[in-house]
Image (tube, rainbow, N blue to C red):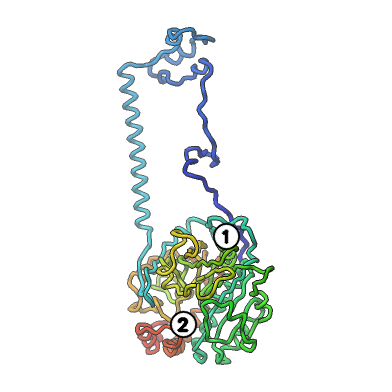
Amino acid sequence: MPPQRQWLEPVSYGSDDDDNMNIRSGSPTTTTPQVIESPELLRRPVGLSRIGDEPGAVDRWLMEPTSSSFSSSSNLTASYKFETSPNTRKRRIRKRRTELSLRSSIALLGSFVIVVTLYYEGLSWTFGEPSEPVSSQPKLEEPSNLLNSQSVGDIPLNDRRIIGPHGSPDEVIHIVHTRFMQNQPSLIELGLARLELLRDFTLQSLQDQSSSNFLWVIRTDPALDSTLKEPLLALLNGMDNHLLVATNDNPNVQIGSILSSDPSSIWSGDLITAQEYLKTESTKPSRVLESRLDSDDAVHYQFIEYLQIHAIWDLPEERAQWKIWCASQHFEWQFHTVSDQIAREPGMLLAMKDQGCISAGLTIGYTDGLSVHELPPIKHQNLGHIVPSCKKQKLPCLDYITLLPTALRARTPTSAGMLNVLLGSHEKVDKKYHQGAIDQEKYQDQIWNLAFPRFGFTRQQASHLRTYLTNHLAGIAQDNLIGQCSLGHSCKNSSKALLQAIIADPAAFA
């Protein structure tokens, strides 16, 4: 279980406070000009001739008697000698110019080093042919900003306002819904491989959450083959807050369908307890969150807690309103490596950044009194077009989750879209993605160290998954090809061609 963390609010101050910031202590201080009340203070060597400008000048100044009063300006002039000769002024000017020139050179050199470092260290490649039209392309993200900013296990809670919400996260209803083999009940090899991913990604991620205040709803085909049904029931055994529902329906909003569920459709979990959790009464919460999590995805172990705290902050109790949260920065696990420069057994992890929303962790929050038809379709590809950013307007709006990275996604031959799955032959992988993966090979140790405390995913688990997928590659590809155009799944010619190539020569892709 990852360590519990406490939300912290970063210290902030306005631009008007910059000049009054104490550099050493970091605390704001106010400086007020002081009035000189006694001419005795003028005996401090300020504005006097520089030391060494004239032989014996300092000694003469120190030897002058101190006068308790200055009756006239002539007395003051007689007590102090100011150097005003042309040679002295020239020496001062030359020295000052030399100092300024040296400082400018140092600053210029420092700026050049920074620019060169950023240029050579920056890894940001646009890539990918999206499975559906999107407004922007995802990018491979340079992970060094993560690697340099924290040690392993030090989770950056870079949120803007977390401490002390006027309410408790326990006052929020939260549903996490996952689809498993819907409309594909008899694809045994594909289903068994997806069970392996469900166990190591989705299930483990939810079991490790810092808050257990959620209901996990898994929807599967009512005709699911017993070869898949029995191990699925075994995986869910011991997890209290779940419902396994036999249905191929996927409503845009889940809460209503669960409250009206037929008890005979519940294969696992306590329906009565779940319905009690979901009922909104006077003593129950008025805010509802619904999150999407595919069966081969994982989320940050503070994902549930983060969203519920934000729901307390952002969703008003006094009126019906909604808001959408989604993830952009994430990790991808490729079951195959891009080259032979690193160990092949665990595959590789890639740091990713999408300029839009990814499906993993996509969440909508709403309050009581909101009708279902008032909520937008929760399709991550189009959210940027139909929902304005929270930076531009108040509710309703779209906001990005700031837990970094938010999600861990699997790229394997079980994927419906087969987008940029590395299989040892890169004809179907975008060239910039391929080059980006090569460049990130040198970061593999650091990325794996970051993945474990956030997602509980280890190289040992990855090695086991890779071995299983490699040994069953032909059967998985065959089933995936059959299920490509089933209801609710991808149907692309490029995916079909790749799967057919795997079936024809699985050894070439192992």
The amino acid pointed to by label 1 is Trp
Where is 347 relative to 36, above or below?
below
Closer mark to the observer between disc 1 and disc 2: 1
Which mark identifies residue 340? none
Query: What residue did someone put label 1 on?
Result: 313
Other residues around mark 1 within 10 Å, as few (<14) / some (14–19) / many (≥20) = some
The local secondary structure at tag 2 comes to loop
**Which residue occupies the foreground of this view, 424 or 350?**
350
What percent of the width, then of the height, locates residue 144? 44, 59
Q: Which residue is painted at 34% across and 69% down in the image?
A: 432
**Which residue occupies the foreground of this view, 212 or 463?**
212
In the rendered view, does 280 fall on the left or right side of 482? right
Query: What residue did someone put label 2 on?
Result: 414
**Which residue occupies the foreground of this view, 288 or 230?**
288
How far apart, in angstroms, are the residues tagged by discs 1 and 2?
39 Å
What percent of the width, then of the height, locates residue 242? 63, 78
Kindly check if marks 1 and 2 are in contact, taking CB atoms under 8 A apart as contact: no
Badge 1 or badge 2: first in the primary sequence: 1
The answer to whether one can see residue 452 in this image is no
